[in-house]
Image (spheres, helix red, strand yellow):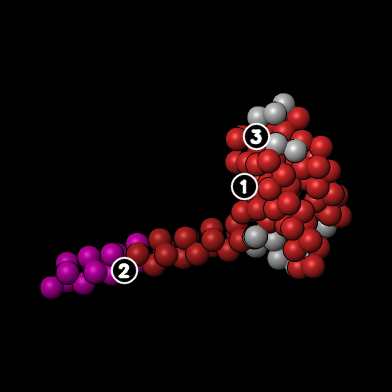
Amino acid sequence: MNIIKITLLAFSLILSAGVTGGMAYAEETAGNPASNISEAISHIEQAITEIQKSDFNTARVHLKAARASAEKISGHDDVVKQANGLVIQGQIKTKKGDIKSSTEDLNKALELYKSL
C-alpha cells in the first residue's frame, strides 16, 4: 500500500512539473514583443532582397512569415495595423510582379515597424 502511495505521488509531481514548465515557456515566447518586431523586420528585409532578385516565391514566404510574427505584436495597434496593410499590399503587388511598387510599400512598412 505504501509503494502505491509513493508511486502516485511521484507520478503527480512529474505531471505538475511538466505542465508548469510548458506554461512558463509559452509565457516567455508570447510576452516578448521586441523579438516579434525584430522577426517581422528581418522577414520584410529578406523579402525585399528576394523581390530585387525577382524571386517572388521566396519573397511571398518571407511576407507570410512577417505577417505571422506581426500578429503576435502587442501594443501600438494602429501602427501595426497600418504596417500590416502595407505588407498585404506588397504581397499583392509581388504576386503581380510589380517590383517597384511592392518594394516601396514594404519599405514604408519597414519604417513603421522600426518606429516601434
Q: Amino acid at mark 2?
A: Ser
Q: Which mark is residue 65?
A: 1
N-terminal label among 1 and 3: 3
Specify the segment rendered in magenta: 1-14
Which sits earlier in the primary sequence, circle 2 or circle 3? 2
Dividing the picture into quadrants, the one containing residue 59 is: top right
State yes or no: discs 1 and 3 in contact (Cβ < 8 Å).
no
Q: Amino acid at mark 1?
A: Ala
- Say whether residue 40 is visible: no
Locate residue 73: give its quadrant: bottom right
Secondary structure at numbered mark 1: helix
Query: How many callouts does the rendering have?
Result: 3
Q: Nearer the viewer, residue 5 or 93?
A: 93
Can you identify the residue that label 2 sits on? 12
Q: CA distance from mark 1 to mark 3?
A: 14 Å
Q: Nearer the viewer, mark 1 or mark 3?
A: 3
Q: Quadrant of the C terminus?
A: bottom right
* Vertical placement of residue 23 versus 100, above or below: below
Q: Which residue is mark 3?
A: 56
Disc 3 marks a residue whose amino acid type is Phe
Residue drawn where x is 60% and y is 35% of the image: 57
Could you give the CA–CA distance between mark 2 and mark 1, rounded to whole angstroms? 39 Å
Mark 2 or mark 1, which has the lower sequence index? Answer: 2
